[in-house]
Image (cartoon, rainbow, N blue to C red):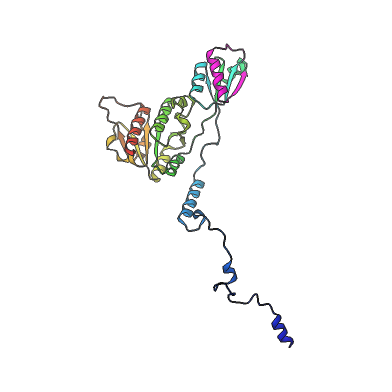
Amino acid sequence: MAGNSQRRNRRTSNKKGATVGSGGKRRRALEGKGPTPPASARKGHVKNRLANAKAKQAARRPAPRRGGAKGPNELVVGRNSVVEALREGVPANTLYVQQFVDNDERVREAVQLATEKGLNLMEAPRPELDRMTNGLNHQGVVLSVPPYDYAHPEDLADVAYDAGEDPLIVALDGITDPRNLGAVVRSVSAFGGHGVVVPERRAAGMTASAWKTSAGTAARTPVARATNMTRTLEAYQKAGMTVIGLAADGEVELHELEALEGPVVIVVGSEGKGLSRLVGETCDLRVRIPMPGGAESLNAGVAAGVVLYEASRRRA
């Protein structure tokens, strides 16, 4: 009898098999698994693989130059130069005005523009301004411009692909005049390009002069700096872009160039020397611009503008 009592009182909640009303499922199988995760988080899904690949690429390549190590501030000196820089929207941070300076119309306009833009206004004695400018004729006004934040070359292509567009990039080889760089930036912006690449050394950078020549378009057109232009162009080729170099003795004329309709990098050399040897050998094609008027070459900014217009026309 005692044995029968123990068997009757024994717990049966852990017995094997399905419970009543379970539809043939065991208890654990009936427990909810929570909301369905997004496709990018589901292992094996194509979006998950793309997200993982993009994360690996971001980890492999250097971070964008924006916010990175900076060089010294650039100084714009002289009343006319300072006023022109402020009118053109050069991204300055501080305007220095000499104590007891003659308060003419240009000084008043510089102070007014700096105030409207929210720049720091600093009054300084003449010896201090002389020291800052290494004795240049500053005329009592000095504008401090922080170093330009360069992008990474790969970022230019990424921006285009993220927007569902074929990259249209201009690379400058041996351009030392910042006004030419500013003109190219302006053309890239006008014709829907995605940015400009310049060498890190022995080349023009985004100075206040380049910014002024760009007529403010540098604010929306990124400029990247390449430590090695040849390797940068090779990386663009591996990413599926055609690299074309502009050369007076190019084997293809501009109107014959079908590559402009796809992802392309346009390489522009200096007006005097043209493309350097290694860069010229790296290009997939060398293209010439027909000039019935007989001119031997075009200014770098003009040449880039002509090719960018042709690319824009074809893509439209």
User: Is residue 113 among what the camera can see?
Assistant: yes
Query: In which quarter of the view is residue 95 placed?
Result: top right
Query: For the view shown, which residue lies furthest in the bottom direction?
Result: 1
- Judge by depth and name the residue closer to the eye, 85 or 150: 85
User: Is residue 137 among what the camera can see?
Assistant: no
Question: Which residue is depicted at the point 50% across and 49% down?
Answer: 55
Question: Which residue is depicted at the point 55% across and 12% down?
Answer: 104
- Judge by depth and name the residue closer to the eye, 163 or 202: 163
Query: For the view shown, which residue lies furthest in the right direction?
Result: 2
Q: Where does the magenta region start and end?
A: 99-123
Locate residue 218, reporting x and y percent.
46, 30
Locate residue 187, reporting x and y percent.
39, 30
Q: Quadrant of the C terminus?
A: top left
**Does 62 appear in magenta?**
no
Locate residue 213, reporting x and y percent.
44, 25
Query: In which quarter of the view is residue 19 placed?
Result: bottom right
Query: In which quarter of the view is residue 33 placed?
Result: bottom right
Query: For the view shown, which residue lies furthest in the left direction?
Result: 292
Q: Is residue 104 above or below residue 152?
A: above
**Does 101 appear in magenta?**
yes
Question: Which residue is depicted at the point 46% across and 52% down?
Answer: 50
Q: Quadrant of the N terminus?
A: bottom right
Question: Which residue is depicted at the point 33% across and 26% down?
Answer: 298
